[in-house]
Amino acid sequence: MGALFDTYSRSSKEMDKFIRERAEKKLTGSRKSTKSNNLLERINNIKQRVADNLGEYKNDYVILVKDEEVKEYFDRIRANKVAAIDTETTGLNFFEDKIVGICLYTEGEKASYIPLNHMSVIYNTRIENQADIDLVKSEMKKCIDENVKFIYHNGKFDINMLETFLGYPMNCPYWDTLVGSYLVTNDEYQRGLKDQYSKYCSHLENKEKIDTLSHFNDLFEGLRFDQVPIESGYIYAARDAWMTYKLYEHQKEFFEQPGNEELYKLFTEVEVPLIQVTASMQRVGVAIDTELANKLNREYNAKMEEITKVIEEQINVYSDIITKFRMTHYNTKLQNPINFNSSDQLAILLYDIIGCNNGNKESPRSVDENALKHIDLPLTNAILEYRTVKKLLSTYIEAIPNKIEKVTGRLHASFNQNGADTGRFSSSDPNLQNIPRDGGIRKMFKATDGYYMVGADYSQQEPRVLAHLCGDENMINAYKTGRDLYSTMASIAFKVPYEQCKEFNPDGTTNHEGKKRRSQIKSVVLGLMYGRGDASVGEQLGISVDEARALSNSLFEGFPKIKEYIETAKAEAKKLGYTTTLWGRRRYLKYIQKEKYEYRYGINRPINFDPLFDSDDDASNEVSQDIKDYYNRQLERANYSQRKKIFQDALDHGIIIEDNGAWLASAERQVVNGIVQGSAADMTKRAMVALYNNQELRDLGFRLLMSVHDENIGECPKENIKRVKELLSNIMIEANNKCSVPMKCDAEVSECWYGESIQV
């Protein structure tokens, strides 16, 4: 879908003009008596502004309305076998919203727009002089049958919109420039089509044209595209297809460069096929147990009432000093009774009345989770419990049933196959990754009537990848012999027998010391893989930073190959600027190649330098290496307060020192995380594509519903569950063709997500 509501940076003059025009529109609109008159006036204004500003570009793009024009354009597409495609729609719901028009571009033709469902704003009826819908459907069907390669930007949305419009599914996309952008660059949030085109393809056009057209969609802000006049909107629409094609050419050139073979293979064999899988999961959706949702709603509201009473009782413990405080503080924000949901009132109660200390010098009046945990009073503990229950109730128990699609009666979450920098999936509406395992909330997600839910996750997928990467014999042998990895690692790190590092004794009772050792080493290992430092690991374990560092040192002493691998991986990342997974995915690290301290001259650079800081060329804009070395030597020996003085001293000499230390340390921690978690993500994605394309699974009625971290969940008719369960585990294990450590993947069958396991 065209990015109709994208925002763009404007110069101050343009912004002033934009604000004035909007103010004039609002003023004019307020004088009108009907909404339709307001809308009609705005549309007439759009027409005039397009005629005034975009007339010179109108012949660069074409509107296809007549039958022969439509047929000829599709003939050319089928002859070329490739075309960029985009849809303009009335909204984002591919079940209920309509396609307003289809945008196409193929080489040798002008970028085109086929209007289909533009409406009269006065009569709310389909206007005349649009393409024949049945003809367009027929021509699209021919393209599908002849395997035309379609190029998209966010194809997951477009292929679902087109399936609803056409009544039959589109083929798997040939290319998706949005998906490609995640493998090509590290553009953070600038993934929109216009952003990508502007950054990588702007050399194709003159700046004046790009600037003019880049602000074009401001005209349509707040309008549905079916209300936009065809002769005004076709340039915007058709241009999206043209930009998509040009961005595709840029990305293809990048992928075909020497050294990018594995990355290109990952794109074509995993990421592109996965678009169809992701679109299918969104379209299929998942059934929701509304009876359970109602039951949970009642239970959690009852919990809220109970906890509220506990909080009120705990506040009453301090009633005397609260009364005294009110008598001496007449202007207090404190209500009666105290509203503990108010951050201001809670802070007054905790810090001014009770006299608590949260241990945070930077935020001494904070009432966040860490602050309340540190205070650790019955009152603050009750408030923490209240907040947890309230969040579960509002975010999941109440929200999920409200997200059920009325057309299908199912929940259709939105999946993003590159939701994290490591390549991991994410989801929204709702965020399935964040739904807690306890509390019964996951059980709201159930199998369709007559189906079983079947899911499988990789057992210790990321530690197995780490074992392969570092080549540690003890880790690899633990997996091959069936021993518990973390107990094995704890045994070696702490130099005690393996049995003393297991969670349970031979008789089934808990081995408390063994469980503690295992948990500590597990936290250190996961900390390494997830990019957490010693401070974070210490906080998780409830120990000091020094104790956490000692644990890390014990691990490295027992497993030196892990340490060696980490250092090698960091050096490689510093050299290249990115990490690479087993399957070739890159994670670009913005700060990994930067120096710890960067130097530049400020605007107050003195004309005459002190000889100590003077270089051979006073006129140079580059700070000399001698000066850098001078400050670097001081900074390496300095503590925090001393470094601040050194920075100020340099500034007095006209030199600005940029401290990249924290960013660099963070980037270094992300190295192993990018490789391990990214490799695990690639493996899971390979499994999803294999599951979706397996013909036997299709014949058995299996369909994927969700992917959550290293777990793939689907459903199938009950009578086929035994074979589906076998196939699911085997296919997921076989998706690993790079990691030498064997994968383990057990499938579970149940009536609902996280429900009681059913033996089949």
Image (tube, helix red, strand yellow):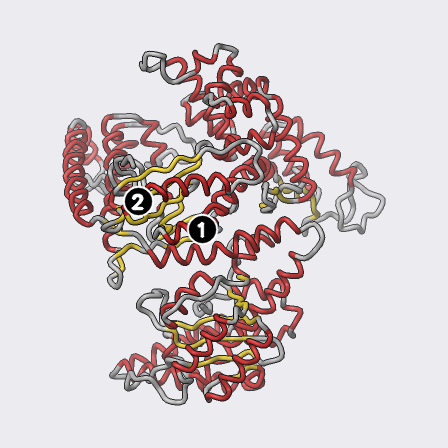
**Which residue occupies 56% across, 57% down?**
180
Looking at the figure, which quarter contains the N terminus? bottom left
Q: From the image, tell me which residue sits under label 2.
A: 453
Separation (CA) of disc 2 from disc 1: 18 Å
Q: Is residue 402 left or right of residue 541?
A: left
Please determine whether, in this image, residue 116 is positioned above or below residue 357. below
- Secondary structure of the residue carrying tag 1 is loop
**Which residue occupies 60% across, 38% down?**
664
Q: Are marks 2 and 1 in contact (CB under 8 Å)?
A: no
Structural crowding at the residue carrying mark 1, measured as other residues with C-alpha within 10 Å and reported as few (<14), some (14–19) or many (≥20):
some
Amino acid on which the number 1 mark rests in the picture: Asn
Please determine whether, in this image, residue 752 is positioned above or below residue 261. above
Residue 57 visible in rendering: yes
Query: In front of the other: label 2 or label 1?
Result: 1
Can you give x and y, in whole percent of width and height, for residue 503 in the image? Answer: 38, 18
Sequence-wise, the earlier of marks 2 and 1 is: 2
Q: Quarter-wise, where is residue 666 in the image? A: top right
Amino acid on which the number 2 mark rests in the picture: Met
**Which residue occupies 25% across, 40% down?**
345
Q: Is residue 540 left or right of residue 294?
A: right
Structural crowding at the residue carrying mark 2, measured as other residues with C-alpha within 10 Å and reported as few (<14), some (14–19) or many (≥20):
many
Can you give x and y, in whole percent of width and height, for residue 270 in the image? Answer: 53, 51
Q: From the image, tell me which residue sits under label 1.
A: 694
Can you name the residue that lies furthest to the top here?
A: 496
Can you give x and y, in whole percent of width and height, for residue 131 in the image? Answer: 42, 84
- Secondary structure of the residue carrying tag 2 is strand
Q: As rendered, which of 13 and 37 lies closer to the eye? A: 37
Can you give x and y, in whole percent of width and height, for residue 256 in the image? Answer: 67, 57
